[in-house]
Image (cartoon, rainbow, N blue to C red):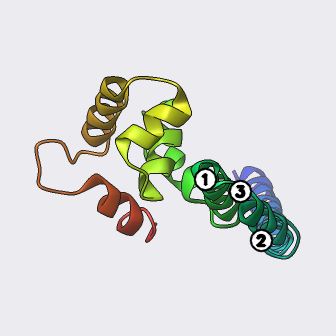
Amino acid sequence: MQEINKQLTLERKALQETNAALRTVLARIEEEKKGIHKNIQANVEKILMPIVSALSAELPKVQRKYVELLRTNLEEIAAPFISQLSHRHQSLTPTEVKICNMIKTGMRTKEIAEIQGVSIATINRHREHIRRKLKIANSEVNLTTYLQTSMGKA
């Protein structure tokens, strides 16, 4: 019995040391993730956004909404709304996540339909499905406001 207790004590000590090492590794990984995020954010802000602004200034007004969508999506890369939304609401399809992102930026149903190449009715159905999956169906909650505020706090 004593021999088994000694062996268990040694194994427990080894497991504690392994857990401590794993915690250290996980902490380093988290630090690296933060560094990568900061680098992406800096690159988007310093390199890509000036190009997008210059492009927007050169395009006719009708085509600027595409540049604004591009700008918004680049900002989302730096501020991970889409990954938060996808993670918190895994039942959303990739198309619904994309539509959520467009709704969050203030785009109207008609604009989204034009960009997606589908009918307004299709976008309205997506909006209904999104509201149901976000558990705000049959409520007075504005979808745009919900996505801008509730998801932003996540």
Between 103 and 118, the residue placed more toward the observer is: 118
SS of the residue under disc 3: helix
- Residue drawn where x is 78% and y is 64% of the image: 26
- Residue drawn where x is 74% and y is 50% of the image: 4
Residue 117 at x, y percent in the picture: 52, 25
Residue at image mark 3: 5
The answer to which of marks 1 and 2 sits earlier in the sequence is 2
Left or right: 120 as drawn, with respect to 51: left
The answer to which of marks 3 and 2 sits earlier in the sequence is 3
Left or right: 9 as drawn, with respect to 111: right
**Dots 3, 2 in contact, CB < 8 A:** no
Quarter-of-image position of residue 55: bottom right
What kind of residue is marked 1? Answer: Leu
Q: In this view, does 134 lie above or below 73?
A: above
Q: In this view, does 41 lie above or below 55?
A: below
| Disc 3/disc 2 C-alpha distance (Å) | 53 Å
Front of the two marks 1 and 3 = 1
What kind of residue is marked 3? Answer: Asn
Q: How crowded is mark 2: few (under 14 residues within 10 Å), some or many (20 or more)?
A: some
Left or right: 35 as drawn, with respect to 91: right
What kind of residue is marked 2? Answer: Gln
| Disc 1/disc 3 C-alpha distance (Å) | 65 Å
Residue at image mark 1: 69
Between 61 and 127, the residue placed more toward the observer is: 61
Residue 43 at x, y percent in the picture: 86, 70
- Residue drawn where x is 46% and y is 66% of the image: 154
